[in-house]
Image (cartoon, grey):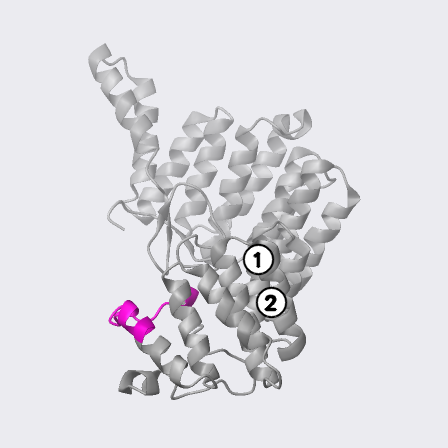
């Protein structure tokens, strides 16, 4: 056997907890390896040593990495049907078979293979993670929450309980089950931003009884500091959708209660910024100006506050039409800038996210205070 193959198989899984090579997405070898040469080498070794199970598994991974799903599946199936195959190897072959099917887009077959592997290996983290992701992608949110719970990922478990509540809401917005899913999510993870946000939005829309300011106050005490702005972004979006009840919209006392809560965090620039936006939406332009100016006292480079102050100043002055048109274009385009970024990988997005679509990090969203971030 060549030297690199010996190195590749120098360690085996221990305790049934992890599978070799799972750190490489879809079975890819490190970029430095010549994959086609590796396939040829492994094929030759397998031909001369048909009992080398580890090599069979690796060869299947190499076929999968090149998109040859049918050949990869054939290798796994031959292994699984071997009489007397050790349960550990059978579980690993089923696990890799599931990944083959997933890569080929055969979701049902992938799920079945992972389930069979789980029956043999038990609550293996690698298997549970695959089952969780497949369940989430198939909108089987309760199943996804269950698997993430077994993985000890309470943030993800709470997230998919909220997704289940949202799914229920699409069919029956006033279902009593929705509040139960949300409360269960908060029990699993009290700091679940998405659960508090869903609860806040439902009260704001009049779908549940309560005062938005009271829910917001509770949420601010539980949600991580770096995620608080998401609550206000969601509240603002809901308000602008025009889906609130007339009572909430016209209740200026409720707005004052919300502003009082935000005033309790005077050093949080983003909360002051969102307070100004809420005031703008209610036509209180002068009060909004004061809140935006408070932002600049905290950070003179906060460009979004300056943008809103520019827009307010434009309304107070009779500008030449050519200048007014240019400013309107500048302001409208500036508001299209992607305001959110992942703290882990730096991905920039224009919409709020709870799991980074690039690196998969949970609750890694940040607000871009400056354009050069």
Residue at the spot x=27%, y=51% of the render?
A: 373
Q: Quarter-wise, where is residue 40 in the image?
A: bottom left
Task: Say whether marks 1 and 2 touch (CB < 8 Å).
Answer: yes
Residue position marked by numbered label 1 in the rendering: 134
Q: Residues within 10 Å of mark 2 (few under 14, many from 20)?
A: many
Q: Determine if the magenta segment contains residue 38.
A: yes
Q: Residues within 10 Å of mark 1 (few under 14, many from 20)?
A: many
In the image, 342 versus 94, the foreground residue is 94
Query: Residue pushed farthest right?
Result: 176
Q: Is residue 361 visible?
A: no
Left or right for 306, reference 123: left
Residue 230 % position (x, y)? 49, 47
Residue 367 % position (x, y)? 38, 49
Residue position marked by numbered label 2 in the rendering: 114
Residue 116 % position (x, y)? 65, 70
In the image, 16 versus 191, the foreground residue is 16
| First of labels 1, 2 by sequence position | 2
Q: Quarter-wise, where is residue 55 in the image?
A: bottom left
Position above or below: 102 against 118 = above
On residue 295, the disc is: none
The residues tagged by marks 1 and 2 sit, at their Cα atoms, a distance apart of 10 Å
Q: Determine if the magenta segment contains residue 21.
A: no
In the image, 275 versus 63, the foreground residue is 63
Residue at the spot x=70%, y=43% of the render?
A: 168
Residue stretch in magenta: 25-40
Left or right for 10, reference 173: left
> Which secondary structure lies at badge 1?
helix
Q: Quadrant of the N terminus?
A: bottom left
Left or right for 171, reference 18: right
In the image, 98 versus 303, the foreground residue is 98
Residue at the spot x=57%, y=55% of the render?
A: 107
Q: Is residue 355 visible?
A: yes
């Amino acid at each position: 056997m060549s030297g690199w193959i010996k190195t590749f198989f120098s360690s085996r899984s221990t305790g049934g907890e992890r599978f070799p090579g799972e750190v490489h997405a879809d079975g890819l070898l490190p970029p430095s390896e010549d994959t086609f040469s590796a396939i040829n080498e492994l094929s030759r070794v397998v031909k001369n040593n048909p009992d080398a199970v580890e090599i069979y598994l690796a060869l299947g991974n190499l076929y999968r990495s090149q998109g040859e799903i049918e050949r990869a599946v054939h290798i796994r199936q031959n292994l699984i049907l071997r009489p007397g195959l050790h349960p550990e190897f059978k579980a690993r072959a089923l696990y890799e078979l599931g990944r083959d099917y997933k890569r080929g887009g055969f979701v049902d077959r992938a799920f079945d293979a992972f389930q069979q592997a789980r029956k043999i290996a038990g609550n293996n983290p690698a298997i549970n993670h695959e089952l969780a992701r497949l369940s989430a992608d198939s909108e089987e949110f309760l199943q996804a929450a269950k698997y993430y719970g077994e993985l000890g990922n309470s943030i993800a478990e709470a997230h998919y309980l909220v997704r289940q509540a949202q799914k229920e809401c699409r069919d029956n917005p006033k279902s009593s089950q929705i509040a139960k899913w949300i409360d269960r999510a908060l029990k699993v993870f009290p700091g679940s931003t998405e659960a508090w946000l869903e609860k806040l939005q439902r009260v704001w829309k009049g779908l549940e009884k309560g005062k938005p300011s009271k829910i917001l106050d509770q949420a601010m005490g539980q949600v991580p500091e770096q995620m608080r702005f998401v609550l206000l972004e969601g509240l603002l979006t809901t308000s602008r959708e025009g889906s609130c009840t007339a009572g909430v919209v016209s209740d200026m006392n409720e707005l004052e209660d919300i502003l009082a809560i935000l005033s309790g965090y005077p050093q949080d620039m983003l909360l002051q910024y969102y307070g100004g936006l809420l005031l703008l939406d209610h036509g209180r332009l002068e009060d909004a100006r004061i809140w935006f100016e408070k932002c600049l006292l905290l950070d003179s480079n906060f460009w979004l506050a300056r943008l809103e102050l520019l827009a307010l100043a434009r309304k107070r002055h009779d500008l030449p039409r050519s200048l007014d048109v240019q400013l309107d274009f500048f302001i409208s385009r500036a508001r299209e800038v992607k305001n959110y970024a992942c703290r882990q990988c730096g991905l920039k997005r224009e919409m709020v996210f709870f799991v980074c679509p690039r690196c998969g990090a949970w609750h890694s969203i940040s607000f871009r205070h400056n354009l050069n971030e």
